[in-house]
Structures are given as C-alpha cells and as structure tokens.
Image: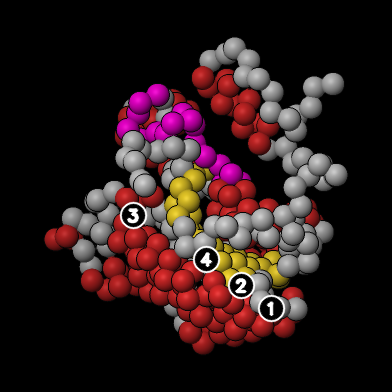
C-alpha cells in the first residue's frame, strides 16, 4: 500500500506540480509508533516568544505535538488567548498564553517566573519575538534612518532575546538540561538592511557566545536563519508584489521562485512556517546534543554563497 509517510520516488510532472505534491506530503503528520524517532521531548516545558502567529506559532504547535507544554508569549493578549485555545485543542497539551513585552526586563522576568510556576519548569526557549526585516524607518538608506527606531528594533530582537535567555538560564541550570533557539534571518548574510541585517548578525554572535558559556550546564544554544517563509503575512506581501509586477499574486510567486530567480531558492518554492518549525523542534530535542553554537539556514537553499 502506498504510504504518505514514506517519501516516494519523484513522479514525472512539472516543477510546480512536484513541489506542490512534496508540500502536501510535508503537511501530513506521521503516526507515532515503533519506528518513529523519539525526540525525547515528552513532558518538557517551553517558552516561545512571538508565539501568537507566524513562525513562532508554528514552532509552538510542533513542540506541543511532540508532547511539550508551551507558554506562548506576545504583546497582544487577545491574539495569544486565541492561539492558546487553537493549539490546545489541536494537540491536547497545556498551552499557556502570557502577555509580555520583551523590551521590559520586569515583564520578561515576571513572564518567565509565571511560566515556570504554571508549567513546572522551563527546558526550552525559542526567541522569535520580533517583526521580520525591521522598521521601515530603520532599514536604510542611511540618510533616512530614524535613530530611535533603529535602537528600538535592536531592543526588541537582540536585547529582547538576551533578556529572555538570561531569565530562563537559572531554571535550565537547575534542570541540568536546556535548549535556547534564536530565530534570526537570512538578511544577516546580505548587505542592504541596516536594521534587519545587523541585528540578525548580532543574534548569531550571541548564540555562539551563550553556547560556549552554557554548554557545561547541559544547555545548547543554536540559531536559525529562515528565508522567505509562508505565514499569515504572505497573502498581503504577494498582493503588493503582484501590483508591482502587474500580474496575479500566484504568478508573482511563480516568477519569484522559478529556477535561477534571484529572489527564490534551490527548491523553487516558498518554505512554509511549519518546515522552519520542524528544524526548530529537532534542535530543541534530546537528539541534538551534537549541535550547539551553530547557525542553521532554513531557506530552501537561497543564494549561492558557500559558508564553511
């Protein structure tokens, strides 16, 4: 019997048809059984900032599917509560909505303490609490940069991740086990964005520094660079791109991800947020001890530069 859980040989068809077929296979959650890889996450407790939507929400969902109780954190309480209800119903795990602003040390410390108290500890932190790209008034050209907005972007993404990491470390040290995963971005590797590129590069540096400091306590720290990723924001972004090109949103996406397009990637389709989440869950798992202080690109093979 054909199984959707075993990758089948690629059938003949157009590039788009093959990619759509592969995307459909990815969307199927395989049954857990004797042959499933046990990631060792059952009963662990996590905090995911930026957890009400986008990549953060996708990561929270996949962690919960692996048996993790998750505190989802963002500023919008209403959106958080809706996400908690949705993911709780899907996964039958404890999804705790906690409203907090990562630019406030007091709010971060209070949020982490409450998560630890209600969940029974903290083993995993995913720092995903910032808008992609940075503020429009902070990306450049340099003559247009508003200093206060640039500083605020760093305060949210870089210092926000530092505050959250600092707050969870005592709980991880007590447990003798911890995972910190920083969601950065591919524009760290490309000149042009004075906010997004710079703060993402800084997050990579912090990742390695914390990995060196914390590995002796049983804590690994890693970073992920998503590329263009399908989230709730994608329809509006594609609509704007379509207007720019004078085509439909579907055609705009097809053109941007056609072979050898400078805006696309090697797999010639947009990566879904769930696929970034799969990478995150592995790095959070008990199988990932060998990986610490590292950067993983989850862009579908964007760009042609070689990093070694």
Of labels 1 and 2, the one closer to you: 2
Q: Earlier in the sequence, mark 3 or mark 2?
A: 3
Residue at the farthest left position: 143
Q: Position of residue 154 (x, y in %)?
A: 35, 70
Q: Position of residue 281 (x, y in %)?
A: 63, 55
Quick check: can you spot residue 97? no
Whether pointer 1 and pointer 2 mark residues with C-beta atoms closer than 8 Å, the reply is: yes
Question: In the rendering, which numbered label is found on residue 221?
Answer: 4
Q: What secondary structure is marked by label 4?
A: strand
Q: Is residue 123 left or right of residue 253?
A: right
**Corner quadrant of residue 69:** bottom right
Q: Earlier in the sequence, mark 1 or mark 2?
A: 1
Which secondary structure type mostly characterizes the magenta part of the structure? loop
Label 2 crowd (10 A; few <14 / some 14-19 / many >=20): some
Q: Distance between the Cα atoms at labels 4 and 3?
A: 18 Å
Specify the segment rendered in magenta: 259-275
Label 1 crowd (10 A; few <14 / some 14-19 / many >=20): some
Q: What secondary structure is marked by label 3?
A: helix
Quick check: can you spot residue 149? yes
Q: Position of residue 167 (x, y in %)?
A: 55, 81
Q: Distance between the Cα atoms at labels 3 and 2?
A: 28 Å
Q: Distance between the Cα atoms at labels 1 and 2?
A: 9 Å
- Residue 263 against residue 88 in the figure, above or below: above
Say which residue label 3 marks: 188
Say which residue label 2 marks: 218
Say which residue label 1 marks: 175
Residue at the (52%, 75%) spot, across then down: 214
Residue at the (40%, 38%) spot, across then down: 302
Question: In the rendering, which numbered label is found on residue 284?
Answer: none
**Corner quadrant of residue 100:** bottom right
Q: Distance between the Cα atoms at labels 4 and 2?
A: 10 Å
């Amino acid at each position: 019997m054909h199984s959707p859980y075993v990758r089948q040989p690629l059938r003949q068809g157009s590039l788009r048809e093959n990619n759509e077929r592969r995307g459909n296979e990815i969307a199927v959650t395989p049954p857990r059984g004797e042959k499933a890889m046990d990631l060792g996450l059952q009963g662990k407790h996590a905090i995911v900032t930026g957890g009400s939507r986008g990549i953060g929400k996708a990561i929270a969902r996949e962690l919960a599917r692996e048996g993790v109780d998750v505190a989802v954190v963002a500023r919008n309480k209403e959106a958080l509560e809706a996400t908690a209800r949705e993911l709780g119903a899907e996964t039958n795990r404890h999804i705790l909505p906690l409203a907090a602003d990562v630019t406030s040390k007091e709010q971060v410390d209070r949020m982490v303490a409450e998560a630890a108290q209600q969940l029974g500890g903290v083993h995993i932190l995913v720092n995903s609490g910032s808008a992609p790209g940075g503020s429009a008034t902070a990306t450049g050209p340099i003559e247009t940069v508003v200093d206060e907005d640039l500083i605020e972007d760093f305060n949210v993404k870089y210092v926000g991740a530092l505050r959250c990491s600092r707050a969870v470390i005592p709980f991880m040290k007590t447990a003798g086990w911890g995972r910190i995963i920083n969601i950065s971005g591919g524009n760290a590797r490309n000149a042009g964005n004075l906010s997004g590129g710079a703060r993402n590069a800084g997050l990579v540096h912090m990742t390695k520094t914390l990995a060196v400091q914390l590995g002796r306590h049983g804590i690994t720290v890693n970073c992920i660079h998503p590329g263009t990723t399908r989230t709730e924001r994608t329809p509006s972004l594609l609509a704007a791109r379509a207007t720019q090109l004078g085509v439909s949103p579907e055609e705009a996406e097809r053109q941007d991800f056609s072979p050898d397009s400078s805006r696309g990637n090697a797999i010639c389709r947009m990566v879904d947020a769930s696929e970034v989440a799969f990478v995150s869950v592995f790095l959070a798992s008990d199988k990932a001890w060998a990986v610490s202080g590292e950067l993983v690109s989850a862009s579908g093979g964007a760009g042609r530069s070689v990093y070694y």
